[in-house]
Amino acid sequence: MISRRKSFSSPAYILYVQPAKEKKARVGISVGKKLGNAVIRNRTKRQVRALIDSVYTFDESFDSILIVRPPFLKLDYQERKEMLDRLHEKASRKFREGKKR
């Protein structure tokens, strides 16, 4: 997926996408050691899962890998959600356009 380089980025995330292989969309989360120790990384993953649940419907036509960048920690919930929402919308738009062709 990453080698195909179909990605969208923001200061807090990088979103890699590819066409879905199953009926329901799948989302992977990657939180690197640059974010902090294990406690911080696990808390970050829980927060990102909650954001994904609020943004994704899981009926999307693409699978995703979401990489969390260090600026994520400096943002509040609303900013994090807006960034993820914009990335999701860009990816959705890209896959809608691809189906029309």
Image: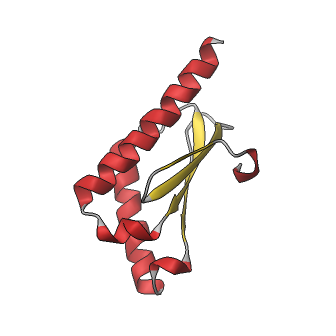
Q: Residue furthest right?
A: 3
Q: Quadrant of residue 96?
A: top right
Relative to residue 34, is residue 39 drawn left or right?
Answer: left
Where is 36 relative to 9, above or below? below
Q: Quadrant of residue 48?
A: bottom left
Q: Quadrant of residue 47?
A: bottom left
Note whether residue 59 is visible. Answer: no
List x then y, in percent, for residue 67: 54, 60
List x then y, in percent, for residue 71: 39, 67
Where is 88 relative to 28, above or below? above
The residue depicted at 41 percent of the width and 59 percent of the height is: 49
Note whether residue 58 is visible. Answer: yes
List x then y, in percent, for residue 32: 55, 74
Relative to residue 43, is residue 94 drawn left or right?
Answer: right
List x then y, in percent, for residue 5: 69, 46
The residue depicted at 25 percent of the width and 59 percent of the height is: 77
